Amino acid sequence: MARICEICGKRPVAGNAISHSHRKTRRVRSPNIQRVHAFLDGKRKHISVCTRCIKSGRVTKAG
């Protein structure tokens, strides 16, 4: 499953993890994606949505 929000398009972001001694290693920050039942176009459907979209009300959860 791709870690992409189907509503806002939020996806993983790559960057550096920096230690106390300032050594840099690559890391990935993934969004909190949840698989929920939602109403899309009047139909009940499984979609992958980030928690920010769920909390802000962009998604109408079904049941």
Image (cartoon, rainbow, N blue to C red):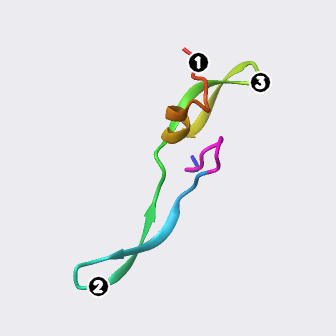
Task: Name the residue: 57% across, 55% down.
Answer: 11
Q: Which amino acid type is shown beneath numbered disc 2? A: His
Q: Which element is circle 3 on?
A: loop
* Residue 20 percent across, percent down from the top left: 22, 79
Q: Which residue is mark 3?
A: 41
Q: Residues under labels 3 and 2: Cα distance?
A: 50 Å
Decide: few, some or many residues near mark 1? Use Cα within 10 Å; few <14, some 14-19, many ≥20: few
Q: Which element is circle 1 on?
A: loop
Q: Which residue is mark 1?
A: 62
Task: Name the residue: 65% across, 41% down.
Answer: 7
Outermost residue toward the right? Answer: 41
* Residue 55 percent across, percent down from the top left: 49, 33
> What stretch of residues is rendered in magenta?
3-9
Q: Which element is circle 2 on?
A: loop
Precedes in sequence: disc 2 or disc 1: 2
Task: Name the residue: 29% across, 84% down.
Answer: 22
Q: Are marks 1 and 3 in contact (CB under 8 Å)?
A: no
